[in-house]
Amino acid sequence: MLEITTGSRRSRGSLVSSAVLGLALILTGCAAEETRTYGPTSAGPTKTSGPRTSSPTDVPTTEDPALAPVRVTGSALCELFSTAEISDVLGLAVGKVVVSKQGAYSVCTWKTTKAVNAKVPGGGIVTITRADGNRYTEFSKKITAIATAKKAKGRKVLDGVGDQAFAIGASVSGVPIWNAAVVQGGLLTGVEVSGAKSKASIATVKAFMIEILARG
C-alpha cells in the first residue's frame, strides 16, 4: 500500500509538472505571436501639398528708387543725345547743340546746318526745354501762343506720356511745326521739332518726348 501511494503521488506530481510546462509553452507561443508584425514598420514618405507659392507679402510693392532715371537740366540734359541722334529725329543734318539759360528755363537747341526753305530762315530746329514743374501752365500758354501765331492750332493730348502732356502744331505753308509739353516728376519738359522737309509731326514729338523722359 505504501508503494502504491507513493507511486500515485509521483504520478500526480508528473502530471502537474507536465501541465505547468504545457501552460508555459502556450504562454510563450502567445507572446511570440503578439510580437509578429505585418507589412512595413517604418513610416511612409510625408505628403506635401506641392511647391510653396509666394504670398503677397513676398512681392515688393514699390519700385527701387535707384532704378528710376535721374532728372537733369542744363548741359547734362543736352548731352543725353548725340548730334547724330537729333539729326535722325528731325530727318535733317543738324550742327552742335547750343546750351542756354532763358530765365527759369534750361534750353538745348540744335539747328540744321543749312536752310532748305527760304520761308524758314536757318532751316529746321530741335529744342529741349526743362524747368520746374510749376512752370507747366506758363510754358503751355507760351508755346500755344507761338503755334497759334503761325496758324498751327492742332492741339492734341498725349495720352500715356508723363502726368500731363499735349502737343500742338500743323503744317504751315508746307512747313511742319510741332511743339509739346509734359510735366512729370515735378519737372516740366518741352520740345520743338520743326523745319521744311523734316520729319516733324505729332508722332515724332511724342516719341521724342518719351525718349527724353526715359533717359532723364
Image (cartoon, grey):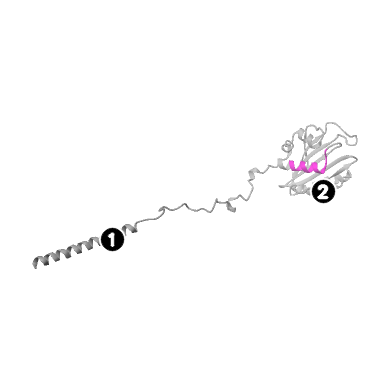
Residue 144 rendering spot, x and y as whole percentages: 84, 46
Q: Is residue 72 left or right of residue 178?
A: left
* Number of marks present in the image shown: 2
Q: Which quadrant is the N terminus positioned in? A: bottom left
Residue where numbered disc 2 is placed: 156
Residue ranking furthest to the bottom: 1
Residue at image location 14% in from the left, 63% down from the top: 10
Q: Position of residue 64 (x, y in %)?
A: 63, 46
Camera-nearest residue between 66 and 129: 66
Q: Which residue is mark 1?
A: 26
Q: Is residue 207 magenta?
A: yes
Q: Position of residue 146 (x, y in %)?
A: 85, 44
Dot label at residue 9: none
33, above or below 164, in the image: below
Q: Is residue 173 located in the magenta-colored stretch of the structure?
A: no
Query: Quick one: 72 or 52, which is closer to the camera?
Result: 52
Residue type at mark 1? Ile
The x and y percentages for residue 62 are 63, 49
Between tags 2 and 1, which lies in front? 1
| Prevailing SS of the magenta stretch | helix
Residue 216 in view? no
The range drawn in magenta is: 199-211
